[in-house]
Amino acid sequence: MQKTTDNILAEGSPFWAALRHWVRQFASAPFVVVLVLGFSGMAAFGFVPGSAPESHPATMLERTLQLPSDLAHLDGLSDLPYWHEERVQGGDTIGNVLSRVGMRDSQAMTFLLSDAQARPLYKLRPGRALRVALDGEGQLQELRFLVSETELFTIVREDKTLRAEMSVPEREVRREQRAGVIRSSLFGAADAAGIPDAVTVEMANVLSGNINFYHDLRKDDHFAVHYERVYVEGELINSARILAVEFFNGGIEHSAYWWQSPDGKSSGYYNVKGESNKRAFLRTPLEFSRVSSGFSSSRLHPVYKTKRAHVGTDFAAATGTPVWAAGDGTVDFVGKQGGYGNLVVLRHAGKITTHYGHLSRFASGLKKGDRVAQGKVIGYVGMTGVATGPHLHYEFRVANAPRDPLKMVMPPAEPIAAKDKKAFEDSVALTRPLLQMAHEAPVQKVAMFH
């Protein structure tokens, strides 16, 4: 799996991902680097504009390796198939991939190219792994290819025939913990610690009710996080949920532990005291982003060039970034409205309304009177109405009086139920030492399987 300035750089092409990597690397360095990008070319990346990589002829080398003397007494060991793993590259065909692993099996190649059972191999995607077992003569013994998270394609040789089948692949969840120290930014610290972007974004979301990640971060703030990663057939598929996080912001500890009640009726993140990390309202109604214009009684309007009150908060984000309902409520308005462009207004308890402007489009089927839950997608960032660039204009009003959502103290949700308090405390007692371990050895990665 964030629509931040950081993430905007990651969209579109491999160049933006590379640039984002360099920006992050230099963000934590003790000096400033200025990159100047032109429309006709760019420098500082070690490539000459218009040049192509040099072509070098490939040479295949084969060597016969002697079986180690301490294993030579094992009859038949030399006849066992040898497993190869090859990553699919852009423009690859199945023939290209199998040639690279050294397969020399005309029967298998004919089967793969002509038999309908082998059609899943037509779905080769760059980066995916093809695992192939060959005997000493280069004859195919077995082939395994992960078509999707739920489909494993296998070809097995049985005597002189090949059999293809589709099955459900093995899925495993690994748990890891890492720790980081803020030097310049949250993402810089997370990258230095080897924490996946999706985990960093989720960490910011989980703690956003207690920490203002736009204004409150300080140098030497530190954190530890314990999270899940999902692997299928040995391949990393995604980073799943955070199980626990501790964040020390300005010397104050903030924590969040994932908890689901034994009856399965409630779940969420709670601090060590069992108090909910969830607030009645989200402080920001979209993933970790950048405030491009804050709440103000007087600011120079970027379009009208006059000073006027800005009774909302603008979050710069890429067009299409999902926008969430800040709290449980009812759709009071959905449509176009003057300078707001595409606008959604939600009505909440306590005479509170929230307003979401400049949307590129609304969530499918959204209409006035609909009940929406906190975190539900209600629209997508755009620049309709009066706007100079893609962003979300967000307003929080109490009895129609505008309030600054970044400075308000949001009331918490319900704490752990009394009947579940002991079970929750026992769970925290098992998890907390793992965070402490990460703090003490921040480069260490601990993985467990279940």
Image (cartoon, rainbow, N blue to C red):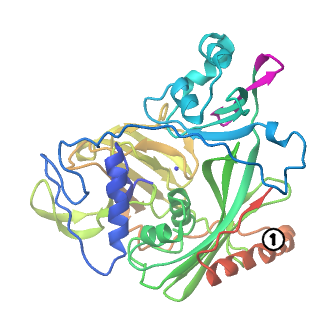
**Residue 82 image position (x, y, % from top left):** 72, 39
Residue 159 lies in the magenta stretch:
yes
Observer-nearest of 298 and 375: 375
418 left or right, relative to 245: right
Task: Please identify the quarter of the rendering in which residue 278 is found.
Answer: bottom right
Give the residue type at disc 1.
Ser
**Residue 18 image position (x, y, % from top left):** 35, 54
Residue 225 lies in the magenta stretch:
no
337 left or right, relative to 111: left
**Residue 155 image position (x, y, % from top left):** 73, 25
Residue visible at 80% across and 77% down? Answer: 429
348 left or right, relative to 450: left
Judged from the image, the secondary structure of the residue bearing numbered disc 1 is helix
Observer-nearest of 397 and 267: 267
Observer-nearest of 413 and 17: 17
**Residue 115 image position (x, y, % from top left):** 66, 11
Residue visible at 34% across and 71% down? Answer: 27
Q: Main secondary structure of the magenta part?
A: strand
Residue visible at 81% across and 60% down? Answer: 261
Range covered by the magenta-colored residues = 147-163
Residue 149 sits above or below residue 281 on the image: above
* Residue, disc 1: 427
